[in-house]
Image (spheres, grey):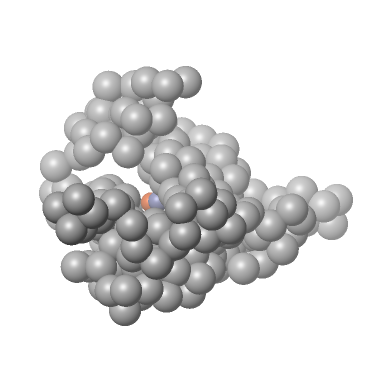
Amino acid sequence: MSDEKPHAAGNVDAGDTSERVGMAVLRERGLEPEELREKLIDAIGAEFTTYYYYTNLRMHLAGHEDYKEITEDARLEDRAHFELVAPRVYELGGALPNDIREFADRASCPDAEVPTPMDDRGGFDTTSLDAESILEVLLEAERCAIRTWSEVCDMTHGKDPRTYDMASRILQEEIEHEAWFVELLSMERDGEINPAGHFVRGEPGDAPLSTNRRFNDSA
Ligand code: ZN
Ligand code: FE
């Protein structure tokens, strides 16, 4: 009877909760689940810190309400990227660091800080702050995200369809984010038109590709 059900049993003993078939099948396909999950923690560390830093960058775009709204789209989508992948870390036998400082430190992208020194009262020196320099920070953060999720796609392609699906959907949004900031920065800095095709998503953060929809619908 069991020959007729080839997947009824495998390398993990029946009832054993110390092992996961969802990890074993990756190993069988040549992907180390532990290595992948650590990479995912680094990657969503960057999504989470970017969500935080974009809050601050958006706050400093006074007078550029259109830029603010687009930054808000990117910010909420990055939060959704964090939310989308966090459960995957646990499925792969891992956990988010208990210490948020450790989590932020291991983020796979640099901190997207407001690009201006602090003044002598500990606030930002906003006299030297312009939209151009903020857009540059936003653009480079998106580029780091594209590199990160492309790497995750490479690692998982043909081996881990679940993570690949997440990473490829995130990658699509990151590529859109780059296009938005290329458009805005080239106009702001160089007076050059580089259309991105961005239209208001609906409510800020309503991504077309469902990473957000999944998050927002359940919220
Ligand atoms: Zn993102
Ligand atoms: Fe992004």
Say which residue appears at 56% left-offset and 40% top-offset.
55
Quarter location, residue 97: bottom right
Q: Please state if 116 lies on the left or on the right of 8 as rendered.
A: right
Q: Nearer the viewer, residue 132 or 168?
A: 168
Q: Position of residue 78 (x, y in %)?
A: 43, 45
Quarter location, residue 186: bottom left
Q: Position of residue 214 (x, y in %)?
A: 34, 30
Say which residue appears at 74% left-offset and 53% top-offset.
98
Say which residue appears at 44% left-offset and 69% top-offset.
33
Residue at the bottom extreme, as displayed: 30
Say which residue appears at 42% left-offset and 43% top-offset.
84
Q: Is residue 69 visible?
A: no
Q: Please state if 33 lies on the left or on the right of 155 as rendered.
A: right
Q: Please state if 162 lies on the left or on the right of 113 as rendered.
A: left
Q: Is residue 80 visible?
A: yes
Q: Position of residue 169 (x, y in %)?
A: 26, 49
Q: Is residue 78 above or below residue 108?
A: above
Q: Is residue 84 above or below residue 207?
A: below
Residue at the right extreme, as displayed: 121
Q: Nearer the viewer, residue 41 or 136?
A: 41
Residue at the front extreme, as displayed: 1
Q: Please state if 59 lies on the left or on the right of 117 as rendered.
A: left
Q: Nearer the viewer, residue 203 or 125?
A: 203
Q: Position of residue 75 (x, y in %)?
A: 45, 41
Quarter location, residue 76: top left
